[in-house]
Image (cartoon, rainbow, N blue to C red):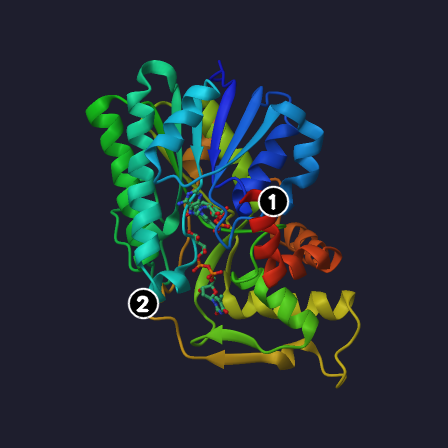
């Protein structure tokens, strides 16, 4: 029997995966009655990405601009909207930023998760499920072989992954100590529409389109496992509906690729779909090797057999189909790309959301 969820609080629902999750979930026959999107709108949160949905969904969709570290705001949202489940996406998510300025990562990812857990606990039996969205980066780096399983010991290497590891441990502790009904998923690299163009794939698509250098860290042979974002959304919802409390699931695409190969594919697709560069050279000529990221994890790879076996989840997209959809989306949504990269966007948020 799927877990009935009526009033779902989504934190970080204006970010890349949160936006895709809310859009995807409203299209499902078993969508909750209401989704409350709780997001403080950092540089990575774009309410623009949900404007059309907000209109269509009417009072089934509510947006609250607030910080997950603000206990009073969290408690008010849970009480006002009779929240019975929480899907916790809100985080500082970009590894490079965490290397330069770790403080916000510690605050949002650790203190913010603690604040939500504590509010969920204090709501008594009202919260039927707290789902924590986490990352495979908590497991550290792999060599040339092997996969992360749910039993791999934690060994985070960046301030980002260390802060996510800390939040995972808090989720576990709230389940073990206080009996809070929790589930947790650790996913590999997502790609798809609405991703802020600082992450590898959207950054490279837009730079390739504009004829700018394509910076590859180190030798370009670091390996990531890529998953189309709505496949991650479907996995999260499957876990939320069916997984036992206290369980954790790894989610991955079985799509391991070295970064250089990903960028070459982007170059070839953009060459095929966009006007040629002014100098007539193929876009691969823009590839530029730059200084490596400090502590750069060499390889991530996910063993996702547990979620396949227990919950019957399978990704719907292959890398080629998902990848082409993604490149097309960025080529067809230049307004969105321009807005999220411009100062105007910050002014627009200030005017509309205070
Ligand atoms: P993102 O950076 O695109 O979005 C994060 C969202 O959280 C933004 O809307 C931002 O405004 C909001 N936010 C940040 N601090 C907040 C705060 N203090 N209070 C309220 N809202 C706040 O991130 P994403 O890529 O969508 O990732 C979502 C979650 O998934 C994160 O927890 C991340 O660790 C996890 N994850 C991401 C990936 C990936 O490849 N992107 C893979 C695995 C797991
Ligand atoms: O594995 C899941 C994680 O994937 C998530 O938890 C993170 O939130 C998400 O940001 C992502 O982390 P990565 O560090 O793997 O993603 P990023 O897009 O920053 O980089 C992907 C790879 O590409 C990584 O090996 C670094 C490299 N890279 C990245 C950028 C931005 C480059 O070579 N050049 C670049 O300009």
- What separation in Å lies between label 1 and label 2 (alpha carbons)? 39 Å
Residue 249 at x, y percent in the picture = 39, 36
243 up-or-down from 163: above or below: above
Of 107 and 290, nearer the camera is 107
Tag count in the figure?
A: 2
| Within-10-Å neighbours for mark 2: few <14, some 14–19, many 20+ | few
Ligand 1 closer than 8 Å to the CB at disc 1? no
Q: Residue at x 41, y 34 (%)?
A: 306
Q: Residue at x 39, y 19 (%)?
A: 128
Mark 2 — residue?
295
Seen from the viewer's position, the closer of residues 295 and 90 is 90
Q: Which residue is mark 1?
A: 352
Q: Residue at x 78, y 76 (%)?
A: 276
- Picture quadrant of residue 291: bottom left
Residue 201 falls left or right of residue 219: right
Percent position of residue 106, x then y: 29, 51
Q: Nearer the viewer, residue 347 or 273?
A: 347
Residue 209, compared with residue 344, is above or below; it is below
Could you tell me which secondary element the residue under label 2 belongs to? loop
> Of callouts 1 and 2, which one flags the residue occurring earlier in the amino acid sequence?
2
Q: Position of residue 119 (x, y in %)?
A: 32, 27
Instruction: Confirm or deny contact between disc 1 and disc 2 (CB under 8 A).
Output: no
């Amino acid at each position: 029997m799927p877990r009935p969820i009526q009033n779902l609080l989504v934190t970080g629902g204006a970010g890349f995966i949160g936006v895709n999750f809310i859009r995807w979930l409203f299209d499902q026959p078993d969508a909750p009655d209401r989704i409350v999107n709780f997001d403080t709108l950092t540089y990575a949160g774009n309410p623009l990405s949900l404007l059309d949905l907000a209109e269509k969904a009417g009072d089934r969709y509510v947006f609250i601009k607030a910080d997950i570290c603000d206990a009073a705001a969290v408690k008010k949202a849970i009480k006002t909207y009779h929240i019975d489940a929480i899907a916790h996406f809100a985080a500082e998510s970009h590894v490079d930023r965490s290397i330069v300025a770790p403080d916000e990562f510690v605050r949002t990812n650790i203190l913010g998760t603690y604040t939500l857990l504590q509010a969920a606990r204090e709501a008594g039996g009202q919260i039927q499920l707290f789902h924590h969205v986490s990352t495979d980066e908590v497991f550290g780096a792999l060599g040339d072989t092997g996969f992360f399983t749910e039993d791999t010991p934690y060994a985070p290497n960046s301030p980002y992954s260390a802060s996510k590891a800390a939040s995972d441990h808090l989720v576990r502790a709230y389940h073990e100590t206080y009996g809070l009904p929790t589930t947790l998923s650790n996913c590999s690299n997502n790609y798809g529409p609405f991703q802020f163009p600082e992450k590898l794939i959207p950054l490279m698509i837009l730079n390739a389109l504009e004829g700018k250098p394509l910076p590859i860290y180190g030798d370009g042979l670091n390996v990531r496992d890529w998953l189309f974002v709505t496949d991650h959304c479907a996995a999260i919802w499957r876990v939320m509906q069916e997984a036992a409390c206290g369980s954790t699931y790894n989610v991955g695409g079985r799509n391991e690729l070295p970064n250089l190969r990903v960028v070459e594919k982007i170059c070839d697709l953009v060459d095929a779909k966009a006007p040629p560069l002014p100098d007539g050279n193929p876009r691969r000529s823009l590839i530029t090797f730059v200084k490596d990221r400090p502590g750069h994890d060499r390889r991530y790879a996910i063993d996702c057999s547990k979620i396949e076996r227990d919950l019957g989840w399978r990704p719907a997209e292959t890398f080629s189909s998902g990848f082409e959809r993604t490149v097309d989306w960025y080529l067809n949504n230049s307004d969105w790309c321009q807005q999220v990269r411009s100062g105007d966007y910050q002014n627009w948020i200030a005017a509309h959301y205070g």
